[in-house]
Every structure is written in C-alpha cells, then in structure tokens.
Image (cartoon, rainbow, N blue to C red):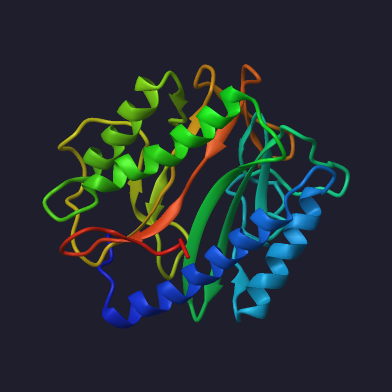
Amino acid sequence: MIEIKSKREIELIKEACKIVALVHKAIENAIKPGITTKELDNIAERVIKENGGIPAQKGYPSYQKGVMPFPSSICASINDEVIHGIPSERVHLKDGDLVSVDLVALKNGYNGDAARTYIVGKGSKEAEKLVEVTRKAFFEGIKFAKPGYRIGDISNAIGEFVEKNGFSVVKEFQGHGIGREMHEDPGIPNYGKPGKGPRIESGMTLAIEPMVIAGNPDICELDDGWTIVTEDGSLAAHYENTILVTENEPKVLTLL
C-alpha cells in the first residue's frame, strides 16, 4: 500500500533528509586519494549522530539466510561495484576512482535516503560522463513525479535518457517509497513503459535512484552477500534523492 504522508510526517522526513544532505557534504569535502572507505563511514556516522539521527543501514538485515546484517553506516561502492559495497580499512581510494556512497538516516521514526557517486581526484572522461548522465537521469525522471502521471512515466524517462547516452540501467534493483520504513511501496524501476504502474499523488515521498553501468547491464553478487558488481568489470554510478510529490513541482529533500 502506498502511503500519503501527512504534513507532520513530511516535516519529520525533511529533518531526516537534511541530515543525509549534511553527511554527503561532509563526505564530498573529505574524499581524496589515500582515504579509506571506513574513514568515510566514520565521518558519516559522526555527522548523523551529531544531528540527532541514527544510521539506518547499520544492522540492516539481509534477506538471504546466513548473510550478516549490513555492518556499516554507509554503502561505499568503488568503480565496478554498483551498490551495497561494505566500507573497509584496507581499501585506500586512488586518484581516478569512482566511489558511490549511499546512506539512510533515521530521525524521530522517519527516514531520509540519498546516494552520490564521487570522483576521487581527477577522473577519466568516461567516468565524468557516466557520473553526469546518472545525475541528469534522476532529474529527467522527476519531471514526471507529479499528480496525473504514473510511476512508469518516471521509470521510462530515466531508462530512455540513460540508453540514449550509451549506458545501461540496472534492472534488478530499483527506487522505492520511503517514510517510517526505509523501503516502502511503490517500487520505482529505472526502466519501463510510460503510462503504467501506480498513479502519482501529492503527499508521496519517493527515493528515486538511477543505477547506471558503462558497459552491459549484467550484474552479480560477491561472496559477502551484499556487494553488487558489474559482470563485465565496467564502471558503475548511482545517484539518488528523496523527493516529495506536491500539487506542483516535486521537492528534492536531500539537497542543501
């Protein structure tokens, strides 16, 4: 069931989203060659807690039997890692690396969610294009996050834009509603047919998140039970914001 949020709920979601935006700003300022993804994780947890929040991903249960709960406050996915990369003290970021940081903050019972792909130092032209197309795909999608459209209109806009620019979208994972739960209805794929899916209504809060691959769209899961990588070893990027559907233009809640 898709929840339409009350004014009070929207204000609480905005508080969680502001924390997420502050964390991403701190991570953006900290990323440089030589830093570890565990150091980035520590920064994120500190900023979340300083602002009265809880790192919602830490301890998040896997749906697979025998797989540990997620151990960190952020997902940090490097280069060919698409999503759900686990921060490590052993991996030092290098000049030209891509690192996708996805994080969820919980405050007063409500969640905010956003992801960014950062280029460490100077990136290749391909990497720069991939990151920019992924970001722009989000904004192409939310042009249709208005009453009168359907979820499929968002999905189609994202997928068409990505493929027009020579890249592939991940089909096995998708965006989602968000509120009291990190993942709520509706699911929001990054591809699909326009005019299909649930109708969009004012008061919906949605986490829309293009996940884009430079090569073919096939993915696989590493033995840790979390990290998703591109099958052909090509680069991947991820861009996500929590938005509020209004009677007019959508509001992006996870940008400062």
Query: Foreground: 169 or 94?
Result: 94
Q: Quadrant of residue 162?
A: top left
List the single residue furthest toward the left.
Answer: 148
148 to 164, vertically: above or below = below
Q: State the residue at coordinates (77%, 63%).
A: 42
Across the whole image, how many numbered discs are drawn on residues? Answer: 0
List the single residue furthest toward the right.
Answer: 90
Q: State the residue at coordinates (55%, 65%).
A: 20
69 to 8, vertically: above or below = above
Query: Foreground: 26 or 66?
Result: 26
Q: Quadrant of the N terminus?
A: bottom left
The image position of residue 44, as x and y in percent, is 68, 63
The image position of residue 119, as x and y in percent, is 65, 39
Q: State the residue at coordinates (84%, 41%).
A: 91
The image position of residue 135, as x and y in percent, is 45, 41
The image position of residue 246, as x and y in percent, is 21, 64
185 to 96, vertically: above or below = below
> Does residue 173 appear in the picture of this structure?
no
225 to 232, vertically: above or below = below
Q: State the residue at coordinates (72%, 71%).
A: 46
Is 83 positioned to the left or the right of 163 in the image? right
Is 22 positioned to the left or the right of 243 in the image? right
> Does residue 9 appear in the picture of this structure?
yes
